[in-house]
Image (tube, grey):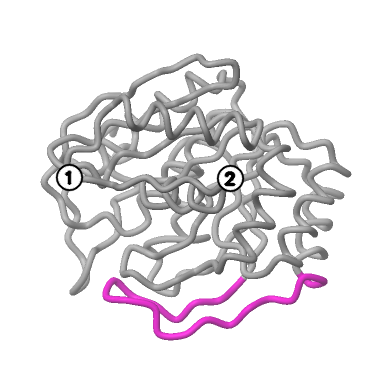
């Protein structure tokens, strides 16, 4: 059985972070392992508190996984400090990880800040260049471009051309493949995969009327990692992951008082 290691924060409500990652990886027929960067006290309405894991202990979590069950892919989510970023990057190089998917988590669905500028800059320097893929949403894409000294106004009518230019800039600057998630656009939920050397793939879908999207970014990136672990190409992995998250959004799970979680097991039950 193929395996994926997710390195991310814990969500006590189970909708995002490590919990969403494990559910998504399992639902896609891959064994999931985890290394926790932070504990969050949160639910569908927001983040109440965060307890950070020290970089040394994070290192031990990752090392014991690799020295026992070598994962075919690694996915990162919330990273709490620049020191954690450096530990992760050093270990990815040490263990020669080829399938590294980076979800540059900066802000929770509820609006809580999960990564400050120092962490983002460390990811840019140490993690992005060694990744297989980074998966920023439009807001995260805009933040990354601001760090590069470019200002993009995310208008209500952000065009395909705008997104292609933004993705090209990120890819050329960070020397990595980029998936810009378009869920914040009005009327559509089109994502753009921009592969190094300029190959563009649009993943088109209509926006699904479902306010419960807590953990959707975690779920997508984890599913991509699971597909890479199974031997699919990057392009195939992204397309399959897009199809999966579209289907589980359609299942219309409604839990909690805020932006609720996704129904990760919907596909499994549907297939029975």
**Mark 1 or 2: the one toward you:** 1
- Left or right: where 250 falls relative to 202: left
**x then y, percent, for residue 250:** 18, 41
- Left or right: where 42 falls relative to 35: left
- Return the residue at label 1: 156
Local crowd at mark 2 within 10 Å, few (<14), some, or many (≥20)? many
**Which residue range is magenta in the image?**
38-57
**Above or below, 245 relative to 10:** above
- In the picture, the quarter occupied by the N terminus is top right
The residue lying toward the viewer, choosing from 170 and 260, is 170
The residue lying toward the viewer, choosing from 63 and 138, is 138
Give the structural element (helix, strand or loop) at label 2.
strand
- Left or right: where 147 falls relative to 110: right
**x then y, percent, for residue 35:** 67, 61
| Mark 1 → mark 2, Cα distance in angstroms | 27 Å
- In the picture, the quarter occupied by the C terminus is top left
Is-magenta flag for residue 156? Answer: no
- Return the residue at label 2: 102
Give the structural element (helix, strand or loop) at label 1.
loop
Local crowd at mark 1 within 10 Å, few (<14), some, or many (≥20)? few
The residue lying toward the viewer, choosing from 155 and 22, is 155
The residue lying toward the viewer, choosing from 125 and 212, is 125
**Above or below, 227 relative to 103:** above
Tag count: 2
Q: Which mark is residue 117?
A: none
**Above or below, 26 relative to 255:** above
């Amino acid at each position: 059985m193929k395996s994926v290691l997710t390195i991310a924060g814990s969500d006590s409500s189970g909708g995002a972070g490590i919990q969403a990652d494990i559910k998504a990886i399992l639902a896609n027929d891959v064994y999931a392992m985890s290394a926790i960067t932070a504990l969050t006290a949160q639910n569908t309405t927001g983040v109440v508190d965060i307890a950070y894991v020290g970089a040394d202990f994070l290192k031990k979590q990752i090392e014991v996984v690799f020295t026992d069950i070598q994962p075919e892919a690694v996915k990162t989510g919330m990273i709490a400090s620049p020191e954690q970023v450096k530990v992760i990057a050093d270990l990815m190089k040490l263990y020669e990880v080829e399938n590294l998917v980076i979800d540059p988590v900066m802000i929770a669905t509820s609006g809580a800040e999960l990564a400050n500028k120092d962490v983002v800059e460390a990811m840019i320097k140490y993690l992005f260049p060694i990744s297989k893929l980074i998966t920023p949403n439009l807001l995260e894409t805009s933040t990354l471009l601001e760090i590069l000294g470019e200002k993009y106004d995310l208008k209500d009518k952000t065009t395909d051309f705008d997104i292609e230019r933004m993705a090209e800039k990120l890819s050329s600057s960070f020397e990595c493949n980029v998936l810009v998630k378009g869920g914040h656009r009005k009327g559509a939920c089109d994502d753009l995969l921009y592969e190094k050397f300029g190959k563009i793939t649009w993943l088109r879908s209509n926006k699904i009327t479902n306010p419960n999207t807590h953990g959707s970014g975690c779920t997508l990136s984890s599913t991509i990692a699971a597909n890479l672990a199974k031997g699919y190409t990057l392009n195939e992995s992204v397309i399959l992951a897009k199809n999966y998250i579209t289907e589980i959004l359609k299942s219309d799970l409604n839990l909690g008082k805020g932006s609720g979680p996704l129904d990760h097991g919907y596909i499994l039950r549907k297939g029975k």
